[in-house]
Amino acid sequence: MLFNDQVTLCAFCNGRFYGGGFQISPKSKINDGLIDMVILPKVNRLFAPYYIYKIL
């Protein structure tokens, strides 16, 4: 799969939590042997607080 666009956040996760308790990938499991990729497309700065709230 190719993603050819601007992004706000891109994370590769093998667990649910990301730096300091952000639950970036809630369906990831640390012992399933897979790496999950999370992409948040470019968002307007006015909507950034909404996405930060959803991640927290």
Image (cartoon, rainbow, N blue to C red):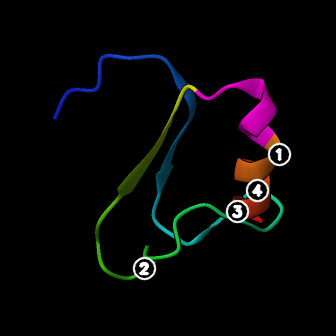
Residue occupied by mark 2:
29
- Which residue, given by chain and number where applicable, does mark 4 sit on? 19
Separation of residues labelled 4 and 3 (CA atoms): 15 Å
Relative to 32, residue 10 above or below: above
| Crowd class of label 4 (few under 14; some 14 to 19; many from 20; radius 10 Å) | few
Q: In this image, 20 relative to 43: left or right?
A: right
The stretch in magenta equals 43-48
Q: Residue at x 55, y 25 (%)?
A: 42
Mark 3 belongs to which amino acid?
Lys
Q: Nearer the viewer, residue 51 or 2?
A: 51
2 vs 1, front mark: 1
Disc 4/disc 2 C-alpha distance (Å): 16 Å
Amino acid type, mark 2 = Lys
In the picture, residue 24 is in which quadrant? bottom right
Of the numbered discs in the image, which one, if any, rests on residue 49?
A: 1
Q: Separation of disc 4 and disc 1 at Cα?
A: 18 Å
